[in-house]
Image: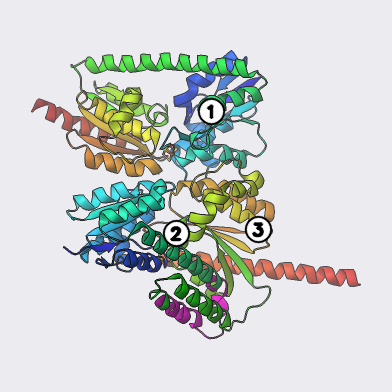
Amino acid sequence: MKKIISFPHIGNYHIPIEILLKLIFKDSVIMPAPKTTKRTLELGSRYSPDFVCVPFKYNLGNYIEALENGANVLIQAGGGCRYGYYAEIQELILRDLGYEFKFVKLIGHDLHPLNMFRVCKSIGTNISFFRFLYYLLLVIKMVGFIDRTEAYIRENIGFEVMENSFDKLHAEFFGKLRDISNFTSLAHVTKEYEKAFRKIKIDKPENCLKVGVVGELYTAMEPFSNYFLERELAKNKVQVSRFITVTFLFFQKPRDIKKILKSAGKYLKYTIGADGTDSVERSKTLAELGYDGIIHVKPFGCMPEVNAMPMLNNIGRDYKIPVLYFSFDSQTSETGVKTRLEAFYDMLEMRRKSREDITKFENRVSWS
Amino acid sequence: MTIGLPRALLYYRYGVIWEAFFKIIGCKTITSPETNKQILNDGIRFSIDECCLPSKIYMGHVYYLIGKCDYILIPRIASCKKRNDVCVKLNAMYDIVKNTFGDISILDYNVDNHNGLNERRAFINMGRALGCSYAKALSAYKNAKKADKLLYEKKVENQNRLLENNDKLKILIVSHSYNCHDKFLGYPISDYIKKLNCVSVFADAADREKSVVMSRKISDSLYWIYNKESIGSIKVLEDKVNGIILLTAFPCGPDSLVNELIMRKVRDIPVINIILDELQGEAGIQTRIESFLDVIKDRARL
Ligand code: SF4
């Protein structure tokens, strides 16, 4: 039987993952789970444990829809807090539902290249370890570039002069990535699109409102799960910065964790689990950089992020920076999210104005 | 010098060691009382809404101790030996307390085996921070461990004796110690089981080491050590008990997955899942327990 390999969604990362798997498994079909929709979440919720965090439900929904479409090999990663234990329970649920498939788990410490290679062999590939490593490094580099590009898009899309110019180029860019199979072509595409993105006309005032998004990795990186919050902000001409990316999680964080803890200063003595530590450190840094507001996102009940909230409250108080908290679950109402974002935006704008008025006033006083 | 011990979370596991250790090195201790309505309400007031109930209760106990001692002990536990983590809530309690109550005097120790800090070293460091010598801290730790071990073995033995008794139905309560033994949370449940003339036995009084080994029969990828012990206890005791109650506090992260695992993998023995939350009505839980016991009685008759 032909192998049909599938995996759940998170942001746009299904694209590089698909590229990598296609390079490795030339004889198999690579099929990312169907696009996440309301139905995905409904399906996932129906078969999930009661108060498990919402990414579990999205993943499960993705798997069910992939299986419905004929997938017979499913891949799950994992690590951090509860995420590391998703795989076993999801496999159990899917089997109890009667599906037949091979379930491949890549959890935390199993992510060593040699081990990943072993896992790929077990799925079925005859490329050499050297080839495998080559492709892996290629795609890691690609992800790095995607992350950098998307950071630029986030910070500027709200200010594009011609509507849709970023989205259009973004789609074209992903199309180009799909043809890449070596470092030279990657370098070409990188160079070409680095330029192209910067060429897009933007009208961005020096002192635009700046908001940083911190929080749990899934809800931060998967726009469907945060009700396209970044997009909503951009619509209001806000520069959005976010730091949690795959590059950060896999390559910067493990290296910098001691530094991160230190930079969190008096707000943390120890790490507080998964991304919670980063949320605290990032919020402090954003406050120091003079950002106008912070948005903290998490699935309902996410322990590491709930752990971070007393510190975030204190940072908000000490630096006088507003923090907006979102907890997402399967019942979150989209209008609720929009209204709260709207109100937050209005508040930031008002604070800006009153601050400007105060400085104007002070200037006048010192002149007279 | 007086050290305050909040009677919540890890107190139920390490309380004996703490008390003995501080006594040997010449510190007094004061332990907060059993959880009551006031402590619960204070805990809720000082916690983020979405925290799990036991950690809210913990905050109430810490609040109770403020002003009644020189230091409050807030340990930080991150990881035990190889691939044994604890819930991230316990990674963070120190910083949560610090950020919530501001300038209170906290005594802490940090156990993080993945990063080379084992419990022994942590206790020695703590002892030295309190001004005693290395040798004294070490011997205090050793003796405290011994005292704990003796008590623990006795507990296991007592429970084994209970398990020999065949006149009454026996219910295994699978839960974190700080849930099932808390006066406010879980105690009313075992008390009620007793009133109905059944016996409750506890996961945390099954042989720990055996439990961890047996836990692999249910899951070999689980990495939370306390949950390993509790699912393992099911395997250790399943032939000796008539039913299992999973007692979980809302919204406990690890339990949300592990209970699902148990419900799907333990099929030969009746299991129910009781979720405790701060608004819990005793009556509702009692009805559920009653009907659960009825089911078990019916089964026993067959
Ligand atoms: S294991 Fe559950 S109840 Fe215990 S601290 Fe963690 S989330 Fe709370």
| As drawn, A114 above or below A132 | above
Q: Residue, x 29% and y 55% (percent of image)?
A: A121
Q: Amino acid at mark 2?
A: Thr
| As drawn, B34 above or below B151 | below
Residue B15 percent location from the top left of the image: 49, 22
Query: Which residue is disc 3 drawn over?
Result: A287
Neighbor class of circle 3 (other Cα within 10 Å; few <14, some 14-19, many 20+) is many
Report whether residue A338 is seen.
Answer: no
Q: Amino acid at mark 3?
A: Ala
Q: Subunit of mark 2? A: A
| Ligand 1 quadrant assignment | top left
Q: Amino acid at mark 1?
A: Pro
- Gap in Å between the C-alphas at discs 3 and 1? 34 Å
Residue A191 percent location from the top left of the image: 53, 77
- Gap in Å between the C-alphas at discs 2 and 1? 34 Å
Q: Are marks 2 and 1 on the same chain?
A: no
Question: Seen in the image, is A295 located left or right of residue B54?
Answer: right
Q: Are marks 2 and 3 on the same chain?
A: yes
Q: Which mark is residue A219?
A: 2
Q: Residue, x 61% and y 15% (percent of image)?
A: B136
Residue A238 part of the magenta segment? no
Q: Nearer the viewer, mark 2 or mark 1?
A: 2
Q: Which residues are magenta?
A: A153-175
Q: Which mark is residue A206?
A: none
